[in-house]
Each structure stands twice: as structure tokens, then as C-alpha cells.
Amino acid sequence: MRCFVAIELPDDVRAALARSQASLRQRAPRADLRWVDAAGLHVTLKFLGEVAEDRLSALTDALRAAVAPHAALALAVAGLGGFPSLGRPRVLWAGIPTGVAELGRLAAAVERALAPLGFPPESRPFRGHVTIARVRSPRGIGRIAAAIRAGGDVDFGRWTATDVVLFQSRLRPSGAVYEPLARFALANHS
Ligand code: 2AM
């Protein structure tokens, strides 16, 4: 099964992001984007790819141990941008301006714990973000970029993340559907 490790967003943050997606879509109706369904918006910590079912218990044990020493995370989502750039984006994202260092340490701990299980570390540095759309082709992207630039630094809200989730990603013709397989509590000290 195809899996990844992520932090879920609370309903109000997902709703604020969904409003922003709808407004961008309205301003650039011809843009060739695949919008991430609001229910599936998340902060990826580590993409695992294919995981054999008989490796799941080793994986969950390693994740539980890696996550447990880290404190609950005060996070915020604000601002929109594009990877690799807003001028020529492949992905549109919402940023994480608060809790970046802690989130990076958590992602690094997850990577270290999973490397011995055969999940290779990323070559690129971790940049916490919420993917809101994937670009299919550059058609109409200029208007999206202009709308994002004109919109300024939109605030989508803040919350304290108390756990990390192992998700299964099922690829459907209508887009990926994400199902939580296991949750790992962050420590409740601050
Ligand atoms: P993203 O948010 O940066 O796009 C589930 O597919 C999650 O895993 C996505 O949110 C995606 O992160 C992340 N991911 C990282 N590498 C991936 C890859 N090679 N294929 C699919 N998803 C990947």
C-alpha cells in the first residue's frame, strides 16, 4: 500500500484553505490545476511510497518511538506560494510560518527512524507546507500567480498538533483518497 506520514489540519484551517482554493479557481477558471480536496489537506512529514503489509507493524513501532519524545506543536498556516517558484509552479502550497524549527526536527526524527527500515532520506531539505493544488500544465497559471500575489499574506489559522498520522493513499480516478492507518501521540509537555 502507498503510505505517507503527515500532520492533519483542524476543520477551520481546512475550511479557510478551501475558501482560498475556491476563490483562486474563480479568478482563473482556465488554469489547468488539480485542487487537493479539502478533506485531504495535510502537512506531509515523510512520503514512504509502497509499503508491504507485513512491514506495517515494524513501521508503526518505529514511528511511535520517533514521535513520542517530541512535544505537541503550535503551528500556523499562512501565505500561498509555488514550488519550485510561483512563476513556474508544479505545486501550489500554503506556508507554515510558525513552528517551523520544531516541525523540521520532527520530520528529521521520522526520517532517521525510518531509514533503517529501507525508506531512504530525502535529498532535498524539509520545507513544511500544505499542498493545495498540483499543476497539470502551465495553461492559465499566470492569472493564478497574479491572484496569489495580489492576495497578500493570507492567514488560514493556527492550532496545536497533538499527533502524527500514518496515512494510506488510495489513487482513484477522481484523485487520491487518504485514510488514516495509525496515530502517534506527541508528548503533552510544552
Ligand atoms: P506534497 O504535499 O508536498 O505534495 C501524499 O501523496 C503526500 O506525500 C503528498 O502530500 C506529497 O507531498 C507527498 N509526496 C512526497 N513525495 C511524493 C511522491 N514522490 N509521490 C507522491 N506523493 C509524494
Image: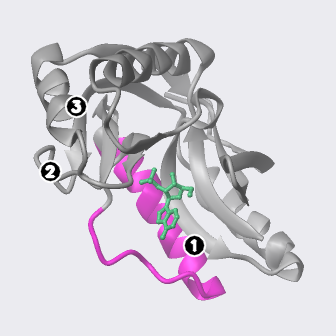
Image location of residue 134, percent across then percent down: 40, 49
Where residue 140 sits, quadrant-wise, is: top left
Q: Earlier in the sequence, mark 3 or mark 1?
A: 1
How many angstroms separate mark 3 from mark 2 (CA)?
A: 13 Å
Q: What's the residue type where badge 1 is placed?
A: Ala
Point out the frontmost of discs 3 and 1: 3
How many angstroms separate mark 1 from mark 2 (CA)?
A: 31 Å
In the figure, is residue 140 to the left or right of 67?
left
For the residue pair 39 and 26, the one nearer the viewer reads as 26
Q: What's the residue type where badge 3 is placed?
A: Ile
Magenta-highlighted residues: 101-125
Image location of residue 88, percent across then percent down: 15, 53
In contact (CB < 8 Å): disc 3 and disc 1: no
For the residue pair 27 and 181, the one nearer the viewer reads as 27
Please name the residue that numbered disc 3 is placed on. 144
111 w.r.t. 166: above or below = below
Please name the residue that numbered disc 1 is placed on. 113
- Judge whether residue 49 can be spotted in this image: yes
Instruction: Count the numbered circles shown.
Output: 3
Is label 3 in a helix, a strand or a loop? helix
Image location of residue 79, percent across then percent down: 24, 25
Q: Residue lying at the far right in this picture: please name it.
A: 54
What's the mark number on residue 85? 2
Could you tell me which residue is drawn at 11 percent across and 17 percent down?
Answer: 150
Where residue 133 sits, quadrant-wise, is: top left
Could you tell me which residue is drawn at 18 percent across and 22 percent down?
Answer: 147
Q: What's the residue type where badge 2 is placed?
A: Ser
Q: Earlier in the sequence, mark 3 or mark 2?
A: 2
